[in-house]
Image: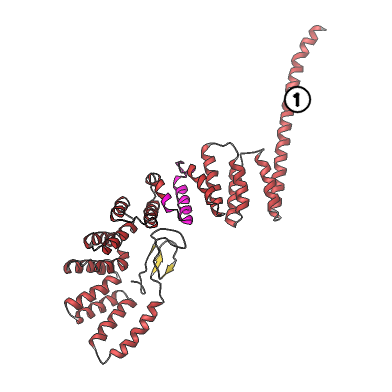
Amino acid sequence: MLELLFLLLPVAAAYGWFMGRNSVKHKELKGRASITRNLSSGLNFLLTDQEDKAIEQLLELLDIEAATIDTYLALANLFRRKGDWDKAIRIHEKLHQLKLPKPKAQQIQFELAKDYFSAGLYDRAEKLLVNVVTSPVLAEAALKQLFSIFIATQEWHKAKLYSAAVDNTKSHSLRIAQANMQTEALKQQAILTKDSLTELATRYAKAIRPKFELAQLALSQNDTKLAASALLYIVEHKPKWAADILPLLQQCELPSEEWYQLLSNLANKHQNITAVVLLACWLTEHGSAEAAEQFLLDKLEQQPSIRLFQQLLQIRQQQSAPAAEVLSSVKELVNAYLDKKSLYSCRNCGFTTRKHYWLCPSCQHWESVEPISGIDGR
């Protein structure tokens, strides 16, 4: 009998292990069934427009199952796009409480910061983004979001704190933004000097704003040499800006031959309307009105332009006294037409305006609002 007992012990142990395993499986299945019920219930609330109940139901799952984070991120982003920032914030804040690997935690911080920004909670958003700037993956996006906060609050001086971080990225737009925001900070603090602007213009060579402000400041102090240097650099690298740069360069009193070469290059190589008009004026002054008129007629055949036609009317009006009155009436109509036309457009979003903005009011891009070209352009 004792021998039989020893034989039955392994059987009993095996039976206990088998039953225990089944018990664990049963608990797992029960837990998964509970998750499925909660998830189904939450989705049902969403489908029946009971979003508050849906969020409560779905957030309960976070305490049970953290592997579905991407699903929650997608749901929160959907709420943010719909303008339901409070719902997006509740989801992201719940996710933020979980203990997750650093990359995923930083992603959630970034998304929560965007929620706060959308809701106008700039201080909270900034505190989160400061930590995300160190992320090798999200650094550029985090810096752009931070700069959006500084634009909204006009705390331009804060941008300088992230100069090194911007330099570590490959973003051209971030460097342009940095140059503009530091220029705004100098103006805001009334410490705009030739030295400070020269430093910015040197560090951010592709930015227009520091050089443009430097030229204007130099002209106000009768430093035409410095102004001409800054303006010539802009027009060489950004010919489209000639409409705004050439009138300032006229004040620098460049040598006649240098001025002529500059206008010829812009008129013939880049088809700039303002350069063509000024070159016609130069021909009238140094040659003859007939030569200027023929030059304008040739250009009008190549590129129809209302402003070139306007200049042609002015020359003919001066040449022909009998026709002056009729041409004057036509010129007034042309002027009235042009007075209603936009002078600038944003290359990024298409926003149009008669006033120049360094920061596009529509898409919030720096230095994207440029002089308009085309039949009505300059």
Quadrant location of residue 282?
bottom left
5 to the left or right of 189: right
Residue kind at label 1, given as amino acid type: Met
In-front residue for pair 217/257: 217
In-front residue for pair 2/60: 60
In-front residue for pair 119/9: 119
Image point (56%, 47%), residue name: 112
Dominant secondary structure of the residues highlighted in magenta in the image: helix
99 to the left or right of 373: right
118 to the left or right of 264: right
Tell me where the magenta segment starts and ends, as one range: 132-158
In-front residue for pair 331/183: 183
Q: Which residue is the site of mark 1? A: 19
Quadrant in which the C terminus appears: bottom left
Does residue 148 belong to the magenta stretch? yes
Does residue 152 belong to the magenta stretch? yes
Against 125, is 1 above or below?
Answer: above
